[in-house]
Image (cartoon, grey):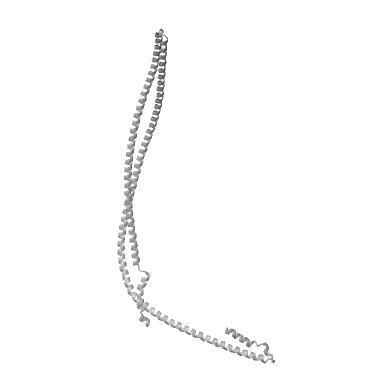
Amino acid sequence: MPDEKKEDLNDEFISPEDGSDDPKNPLGEDDQVDKKILAAKEAAATVAEASEIIKSQEEAYANRRAEEENRWEEQEKKRLESEEQANKRLEALASTVLDAAEVANRSASAVTNSHRSLTMGAKSLISAASNGNVRSTIVISLCVALLIGTAGLFSLVMYQMNKKIEQMDLMIVNLGTRSAEVKNSLTTVEDLTKNINDINKNFDQLKKVNTTLSASVEALTAGSEKSKEEQVKLLTDQATNLNKESMKTVEKMVASVKELEKSLDGKIKAQEKSINEQRKTTASLAKELKNFEKKISKNLKSALDKTERLNLTALELAKVKREIEALIILQEKQYLDALKAAEPRQKDNQMIKYPAKVSSLSPKEKKK
């Protein structure tokens, strides 16, 4: 704003108004002079304000510079104090570092001794682990051999069982054939019963004929007494002939029935004998099968018990092996940690060498 006012005043001084050259207007000249005076006053005021602003800025700059100088002096004092404290700490650390170096040397000697003992223990553990591996391989091989033996026994038993089952199948086939024969014989018995029924029917017919003959004889006796004897003879002859013929047929039928009964009795007895023999053989086979099953179950139980025991021993050996390996790993880690703790680092080496420099650069020498 003051710069713009200065430019306006300069413009007023530089660019006069057009009506100032007119001699007939004295009032216009006075106005111009008043305006110039006012502009000069305003310019003086602006210059005074600018000078005051410059003075205030110079004072603020001087104050800032003084504050910065004071801060710098305080920082230098703090830096000197920190350097003195660091020197004191380094002097105090020199003795501790030397003591630490002695302790490190002693720990190194102890670590070497522990390393020797660890190597001996590791060797003993490795030998024990190798022995455990050998024993575990032996146990596993024995388990495999027992399993193979049990499998062989099981296969033999199954082979024998298959044979006995085949024999049972043959016996069942024979029983089927015998049962078919029995059925055939039963059909023959049914035929015989039919024949016997036919014979009974014939006897009934004979009875009817006898009754008719007796009735005709009575009628003839009533009709004529003279020819009674002749007719009776004829009738008796006819009756005797008929009775003889019927008796012969009946005797033949009875004989055939007896023969059939004898043959059926013989066949039935033979079939009963064969059935009894087959029952005995089936019972013996069933007993043998039960005995084989019992033997197989006993052998399987014993084999399973042995395999379980061997598996348990193998698991125990594996656990022991794992524990030994874990102990070896732990001892190796402890040994490595001890070596790492005993190894001097670069910083430690510098700290061991550095105290001589600190002692040489004592605060008295710094003051000199």
- Given residues 149 and 189, the one toward you in this image is 189
Q: Nearer the viewer, residue 24 or 323?
A: 24
The image shows residue 210 at horizontal and vertical percentages of: 40, 16
Residue displayed at 36% across by 23% down: 261
Quarter containing the C terminus: bottom left
User: Does 59 sit above or below residue 332?
Assistant: below
The x, y position of residue 199, in whole percent, is 40, 20
- Apparent side of residue 52 relative to residue 218 in the rendered image (left or right): right
Q: Nearer the viewer, residue 72 or 33?
A: 33
Looking at the image, the residue that sits furthest to the front is 222
In-image side of 55 versus 93 (left or right): right
Residue 109, relative to residue 316: is it above or below? below
Percent position of residue 108, x then y: 32, 67
Rendered-image quadrant of the N terminus: bottom right
Question: Relative to the observer, which residue lies in front, 134 or 182?
Answer: 182
Q: Pick out the residue farthest to the top.
A: 226
